[in-house]
């Protein structure tokens, strides 16, 4: 298996521009997670999908952030408009979740976003 | 609210040493605790997952223990090697939600 695939790997944009990050989870996994990692705040969960349905979006910073999962093999995280404080590494992870959520999460390589 | 703390924040050891990384969590009602490795500029790789009913897990030179009552987990690395240099993160899970520690940055000197 190719693992979790994220694109782009690096993104540099100017403040106010729209940014779209993409994720392809591991085939057969039913749960998908978007995380953000910064030096100040560490790794934070932004949103969690189960069977393509958003279950917990309490970590989404504000209305400028939105995420979709139109099917089991694709998800996007969009920032519009972007701001310099959004600069971070954004990770996508997937898992095959059972009843107790004891399954390992597999992380993608991340997208390094720099907003100027 | 679950909080996860890792001590020390950074560690430098000579090759061959056995070492222990510490992780503490405030809410003992966890489903599992997982240890990850993160190399610079890379994603996270799962090392060991300990379910709430277990006390420890082993994989090669790595051994992770879990004591829910005291809110602690340790990752033991035997005979450390330069290739073990990375940041190690622990994450406490309540159902799907992982709360991550800030990590221990390990450097093993040749």
Image: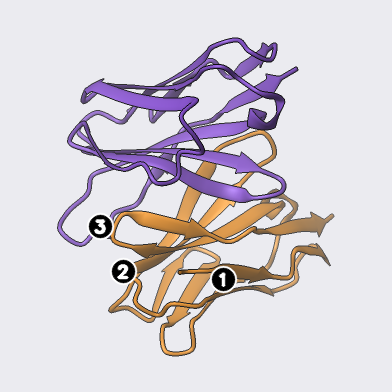
Q: Residue at x 54, y 11 (%)?
A: A18
- Tag 1 secondary structure: strand
Instruction: Tell me the residue at 68%/15% (across/down).
Output: A15
- Chain letter of mark 3 equals A
Query: The residue tagged with tag 3: helix, strand or loop?
Result: loop
Mark 1: few, some, or many residues within 10 Å (few <14, many ≥20)? many
For the residues marked 3 and 2, what is the alpha-carbon distance in whole angstroms?
Answer: 7 Å
**Disc 3 with disc 1 on a shared chain:** no
Q: Residue at x 47, y 32 (%)?
A: A108
Q: Which mark is residue A101?
A: 3
> Which residue is disc 1 drawn over?
B75
Q: Nearer the viewer, residue A30 or A55?
A: A55
Colour purple maps to chain: A
Q: Which residue lies at the image location 53% right of the left edge and 30% below the top edge? A: A109
Measuring from the top left, give residue B23's x and y in whole percent: 58, 72
Q: CA distance from mark 1 to mark 2?
A: 18 Å
Residue B3 point in image, percent of width and height: 53, 69
Residue B41 spot, x, y in % from top left: 67, 33
Residue B81 falls left or right of residue B1: right
Q: Chain of mark 1?
A: B
Please tell me which residue lies in front, A68 or A33.
A68
What chain letter is assigned to the residue under label 2?
B
**Residue A70, quarter of picture:** top left
- Tag in front: 1 or 2: 2
Q: Which chain is orange?
A: B
Q: Are marks 1 and 2 on the same chain?
A: yes
**x%, y% of residue A38?**
66, 42
The numbered disc on residue B31 is: 2
């Amino acid at each position: 298996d190719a693992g979790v695939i994220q694109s782009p790997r690096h993104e540099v944009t100017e403040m106010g521009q729209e940014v779209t990050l993409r994720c392809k989870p591991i085939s057969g996994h039913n749960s998908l997670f978007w995380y953000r990692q910064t030096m100040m705040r560490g790794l934070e969960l932004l949103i969690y999908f189960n069977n393509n349905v958003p279950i917990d979006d309490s970590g989404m910073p504000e209305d400028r952030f939105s995420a979709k999962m139109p099917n089991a093999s694709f998800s996007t995280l969009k920032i519009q408009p972007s701001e310099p404080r959004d600069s971070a590494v954004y990770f996508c992870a997937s898992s095959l979740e059972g009843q107790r959520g004891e399954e390992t999460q597999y992380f993608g390589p991340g997208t390094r976003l720099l907003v100027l | 609210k679950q909080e996860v703390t890792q001590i020390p924040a950074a560690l430098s050891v000579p090759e061959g040493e056995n070492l222990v990384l510490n992780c503490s969590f405030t809410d003992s009602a966890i489903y599992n605790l997982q240890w990850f490795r993160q190399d610079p500029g890379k994603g996270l790789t799962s090392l060991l997952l300990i379910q709430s009913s277990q006390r420890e897990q082993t994989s090669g030179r790595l051994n992770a223990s879990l004591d829910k009552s005291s809110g602690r987990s340790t990752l033991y690395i035997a005979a450390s090697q330069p290739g073990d240099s990375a940041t190690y993160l622990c994450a406490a899970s309540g159902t799907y939600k992982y709360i991550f520690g800030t990590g221990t940055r390990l450097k093993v000197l040749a």
